[in-house]
């Protein structure tokens, strides 16, 4: 099981993700988020995915980004979708587990 916590910044909609896969191909994700758009996406799309269909795509492609293009408010810099995909990819051994950060420097 792989778990991540995503703090997207000023909106405050911290998102927790748990990914589980027995065969490193099909992955089950559980996402808890204060963001209504993220919550609705998983209500609409479900919670089980083919890891290769989600993780091995060009940037901005795949089921989550396709859904977001149509249903999310305009906010291209939101890191939540990327964080969900990173969790899934690490669980399915398509990437190593390593923290990702974005830091503002003054």
Image (cartoon, grey):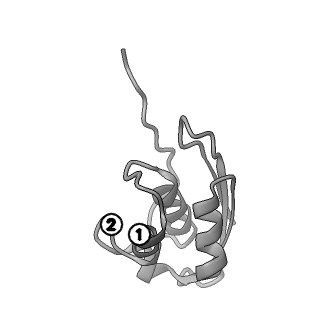
Q: Is residue 89 above or below residue 63?
A: above
Along the viewing direction, whichever of 24 and 16 lies nearer the viewer: 16
Instruction: Classify residue 76 as left or right of residue 84.
Output: left
Examine the rendered structure and indicate whether residue 73 appears above or below residue 105: below
In what quadrant of the picture does the N terminus appear? bottom right
- Gap in angstroms between the C-alphas marked 1 and 2: 6 Å
Residue 48: x %, y % from top left: 62, 83
Corner quadrant of residue 17: bottom right
> In the figure, is residue 59 to the left or right of 19?
left
Residue 2 in the image: state x and y as whole percent. 65, 62
Lower sequence index among marks 1 and 2 = 2
Q: At 46% from the left edge and 74% from the top edge, which residue is drawn?
A: 67
In the picture, measured across the screen, residue 30 lies left or right of residue 95, that is: right
Q: What's the residue at 66%, 82% (across, down)?
A: 22
Question: In the image, what residue occupies the spot 52% across and 54% down?
Answer: 80
Is 74 or 94 nearer to us in this picture? 74
Quickly name the residue at label 1.
65
Task: Examine the rendering and report whether any part of residue 34 can be seen.
Answer: yes
Rendered-image quadrant of the C terminus: top left
Return the x and y of residue 70 as percentages of the image width and height.
Answer: 42, 72
Local secondary structure at mark 1: helix
Tag 1 near tag 2, CB within 8 Å: yes
Instruction: Using the image, tell me which numbered label, if any, was put on residue 60.
Output: 2
Q: Secondary structure at mark 2?
A: loop
User: Can residue 21 be seen at all in this image of the molecule?
Assistant: no
Residue visible at 64% across and 52% down in the picture = 15
Tell me the quarter of the picture where residue 47 sits.
bottom right
């Amino acid at each position: 099981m792989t778990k991540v916590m995503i703090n997207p910044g000023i909106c405050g909609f911290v998102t927790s993700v748990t990914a589980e896969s027995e065969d490193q191909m099909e992955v089950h994700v559980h996402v808890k988020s204060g963001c209504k758009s993220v919550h609705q996406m998983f209500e609409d799309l479900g919670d089980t995915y083919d890891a290769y269909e989600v993780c091995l795509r060009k940037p901005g492609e795949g089921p989550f980004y396709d859904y977001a293009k149509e249903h999310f408010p305009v906010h291209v810099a939101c890191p939540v979708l990327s964080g969900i995909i990173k969790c899934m990819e690490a669980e399915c051994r398509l990437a190593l587990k390593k923290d990702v950060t974005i830091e503002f420097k003054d």
